[in-house]
Image (spheres, grey):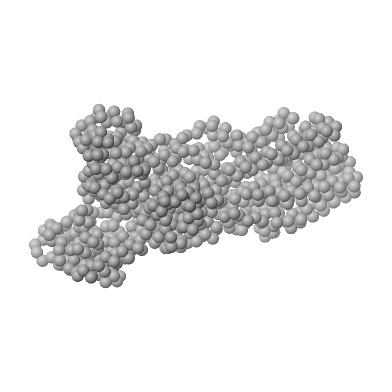
Amino acid sequence: MTKPPNNQASQFWRLPTDALCTRLGCSLQGLTATEAAERLGRFGPNSDAPPRIEGAARAVLRRLLEPLSLILLVAGIVSMLTGDDVGGLIIVLILAGSIGLDTIQEGHAVRAAEILRRSVALKAEVRRDGAFCEIDVDHVVPGDLLRVRAGDIIPADGLILESTAFTAGEAALTGEPYPVQKRAGATDPDDTSNALFRGAVAQTGEAIALVVRTGRDTVFGAAASALAETQAPSPFERDLREFGLVIARATLALVLVVLTVRVVFGRPVLDSLLFAVALAVGLTPELLPMITTVTLSRGALRMAGRKVIVKRLAAIHDLGAMTVLCTDKTGTLTSAEITLARSLDAEGKDNARAAQLGAIAASLGGDRGSLDAALVAGRPDAAQGWTLAGRQAFDFSRRLGSVLATGPEGTLLIVKGAPEAVLALCTMDERARTAALARVRELASEGLRTVAIASRAWSGVLREVETEDETDLAFEGFCAFADPPKPTAAAAIAQLAARGVGLKILSGDDPVVVKRLASLVGLNPERVLSGTDVAALSDAALAVQVRSTDAFGRLAPDQKSRIVRALQAGGEVVGFLGDGINDAPALKVADVGLSVDGATGVAQAAADMILLASDLEVVADGVAEGRRTFANILKYVRMGASSNFGNMLSMAIASMVLPFLPMLPTQILLNNLLYDLSELGIPFDRVSAQATAQPQVWSMSNLARFAAIMGPLSSVFDFLTFGALIMLFHASPGEFRTAWFIESMATQILVIFVIRTNGRPWRNWPDPVLSASSLIALLVAMVVPFTPVGTWFGFVAPPPLMMAGIALLVVVYLACAELLKPFAIRSKRKR
């Protein structure tokens, strides 16, 4: 019996009815309208706290206060204050567009929380002033007498007082796909069969219950409250913030050093200030927000084509960085549809007889529950030629039911029900009965639910069946049922494993069932931790155990989120895929939350992405898209960490050594503008399979390694250029600046074709859009110095021999960059 999560104080099903009435201050006659109104004021409406909604202004301000955004804002303002109105305006507009797109995209997620209101009943039937009446579900209060019938969504938690053949589907709460029998009366401490829980669905029969918990105090409400909690920054957001801080420190340090040294050496203060500001703008990756937003937006569009709706753009990167995917069982790995798995005879051999008789009984006189539906679906034509002559409805206290059917075999009494109950009525010796029960336990160890079938020929008058008639039965066999894994589950798990993503099952279902499922889908079934086991472990011990355990059963919602946190504490980037109310806390805590179309409103509201097809293959496709998106963002960052940073560093050093500025502030800004234009095609670029083979993370140490190798390489060639221009070509200041501008633009733009792929460039051609944006920007940089426009920027056309020398240096630089690239991008990911 699955126990929905609750704390000790909330376990009302353990209390006697009179004690519960005393605690609630009510009677078993229901409430009066006056009492209900007073309780509504005291306990509040039977609804959940709305998710904390962030206003548009606050959302924009939060993004604007990110380090990288502040750097860009300051750079844009300073540029405009120092005369570069166009450059400053471009920077500010890029920043505003990026923040606006991000805010609008994530704003859609807030509206998704409204689905929550449609996931519970809108009306409820309660007893007020001595008579049952319908009221708005928000007005149900503790102490109400509640009546629920088949098809109703249960509106509150309560203790059952009366029931008639009542079962409830609690899969969304507990993960268990089978209907749960509900009845009044005392139970074992861990048995909740006498309790109703908000959000469950009444499947058969009718029940009257005493309402104990409403709104946020219910199991449903506790899970839904996760939506109101502030979500921690995602891995991508943390990485972006850290990168912004690194850039801010480097920019500030370089600008202060250059400005101080030039002033100390007696250089003009205004020229030094303008040059330092230009350096700061040149160092600032002003296109990063735009590149990031456009790349993620394109990724979201492609993922929509793959049946994934993205609610939070940054989640695309987080999905690509994911190293462990935790998933619920029911509805994700399995279809949540009970099927007839086996039909066995009395000797345990596969035989269709038991399923045939079971399907006749289910078709003619079943309770229309999920097990009867599975019997009929397994043998749809079984009842042809048979007619119903009488029946004894399924009795939950006796755990069996029977039908009297007339057909090709004459008249048969067919009895089906719990194995222990049916076997006790059969003419078999104790040894055979013991063997049959052992077979039931064996089937249970395989995760199968069993129903026994028995029959006897009817020789009397056709009439309604009495319980006294259910004797001297011949045991026909067992029907075994399963919630089987989806056909694609095992292949999708193997596909995820090949991409470096491990999978763990976090289920509220029986550990035996979870163990069986784990073995069927290719996970390690040797060890399954139950909710009891998890509760007994400290956080540190759990962090160790989760590394080697693939399957968990009988978990409460808070235990699912605790396991997610334990994995995160071990350095994993964790995704969670779930569709039930009990999955909401884990969805909120995970680095990336995934839900499915048709899931409960709570799960959809808590998730970052919604899969339109409830299939792990869709997740595997999404992982590849996330890595592709991140790979393109990383190209831009690598460019800034290589030639761009190297050129600005070289310029800073040269400005302190040369008697003239190595490049005028306007030339630096033109360099920066053309360089940015060359990168506009990055979001459209192709990505090699090698780049998406393993989880992608934005590692500052890896970027530092790349910058430490490729940045100095760029500076070395800058200094070679300086030496050649001064010592070989005796260039004038104008020629020096022009030649170095051309060399700087050529190295910065062309190196993207080298560092955009981990392999050889000629084996992985760039997308035409990237080729066009890069080569057009390079062509403009090559042509402008030789046109009248060039004089506006202070350019002087260099002689042909000087240009030939510059071309040679560029070719040698690109060759060296290709040779050193494997050392720069080689990294070992911590796991």
Q: Nearer the viewer, residue 184 or 62?
A: 184
Q: Classify residue 44 as left or right of residue 635.
A: left
Quadrant of the image containing the C terminus: bottom right
Residue 607 in the image: above or below residue 255: below
Q: Nearer the viewer, residue 279 or 176?
A: 176
Within the image, what quadrant is residue 821 found in? bottom right
User: Which residue sits furthest left?
Assistant: 461
Q: Residue at x 28, y 39 (%)?
A: 211
Report how many numbered discs are placed on residues in the image: 0
- Residue 279 placement (x, y as % from top left): 75, 38
Residue 404 in the image: above or below residue 8: below
Residue 352 shows in the view: no
- Residue 288 placement (x, y as % from top left): 64, 42
Q: Nearer the viewer, residue 766 or 108?
A: 108
Residue 428 in the image: above or below residue 583: below
Q: Classify residue 590 as left or right of residue 409.
A: right
- Residue 628 placement (x, y as % from top left): 59, 52
Q: Residue at x 11, y 58 (%)?
A: 463
- Residue 89 placement (x, y as % from top left): 67, 33
Q: Residue at x 84, y 51 (%)?
A: 804
Q: Nearer the viewer, residue 681 or 226?
A: 226
Q: Classify residue 327 as left or right of residue 77.
A: left
Q: Residue at x 40, y 35 (%)?
A: 49
Residue 104 shows in the view: yes
